[in-house]
Amino acid sequence: MSNSSSISHFLLLALADTWQLQLLHFCLFLGISLAALLGNGLIISAVACGHHLHTPMFFFLLNLALSDLGSICTTVPKAMHNSLWGTRKISYTGCAAQVFFLLFFLGSEYFLLTIMCYDRYVSICKPLHYGTLLGSRACAHMAAAAWASAFLNALMHTANTFSLPLCHGNALGQFFCEIPQILKHLCSHTNSFRELGLIALSACLVFGCFVFIVFSYVQIFRAVLRIPSEQGRHKAFSTCLPHLAVVALFVSTIIFAHLKPPSMSSPSLDLALSVLYSVVPPALNPLIYSLRNQELKAAVRRLMTGCFQVH
């Protein structure tokens, strides 16, 4: 019986058992990661360089793009390395770092999406108070609170998980390190009570944010439907629907991945769901936002045109 102090590495889930399939997975991850890097990089550059985009909505979108970049850079490079070199190993400290940064970036994304919902609520339901409620200082404080809350949550979960004794091997049923997979190797499930308490605390926070998002959108849609002009309703919906689509994709995949019945669990389904919530959103989010937002599309177009003219 070994414990966590004697474990030098973990074995991640092998994505394929043949070289051809490993190369295919490498190419798929490479394509998705390049799309995420390009899309989020363009959003960050466009918002940073476009002075007319220095508004609360685009400030939070810039923070969301940073979170997406961090999220995909936490899991995908190691998966690509393992696929290319046909290995499954990740060091103990590397696994702990991956757990921390994944929780940190996913948590910050969720909190930022909640704040962005508040931004849309104030913009549509309380437009006369927008400048007061969402001034530059208030926006900076809200973004800092989102990042700080995600940091503390990730730190608590990571420190607690990697302080527990592990006895049942070191093979993880996932292509990246995550807490549920590590908890399966506990020496005794009585040791997991502290982690269950932290999970319950985080679940309450997540549920509270979810209720806030649902309540806000109920108020938003009621306000939008009262707008007399069709053009005004279309403009309001065009700023809300991308955010709602991103929230729905992010929340639904995570909930289904972690709360689905055990009878539905299978290695292939678990792998597909983990890719959906950890890899796909960072690549899709820039596309979802840029498709519906004319200001962002114009800023990205000017940025790319300027780059081509320089070269």
Image (spheres, rainbow, N blue to C red):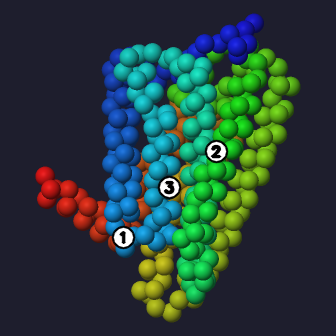
Amino acid identity at mark 1? His
Where residue 212 appears, as percent x and y from the top left, is 69, 65
Element at label 1: helix
Q: What's the residue at 39%, 35% (across, down)?
A: 29
Amino acid identity at mark 2? Phe
Of marks 2 and 1, which one's residue comes earlier in the chain?
Answer: 1
Q: Residues within 10 Å of mark 1 (few under 14, many from 20)?
A: few
Query: Which residue is label 3 attached to?
Result: 64
- Viewer-proximal residue among 128 and 48: 48
Q: Nearer the viewer, mark 3 or mark 1?
A: 1
Q: Is residue 9 above or below residue 242?
A: above
Q: Is residue 262 left or right of residue 75?
A: right
Q: What's the residue at 51%, 93% (across, down)?
A: 228
Q: Is residue 178 above or below residue 221?
A: above
Any part of residue 165 in sight: yes
Q: CA distance from mark 3 to mark 1?
A: 18 Å
Where residue 247 appears, as percent x and y from the top left, is 56, 58
The quarter holding residue 295 reads bottom left
Q: What's the residue at 26%, 61% (across, down)?
A: 303
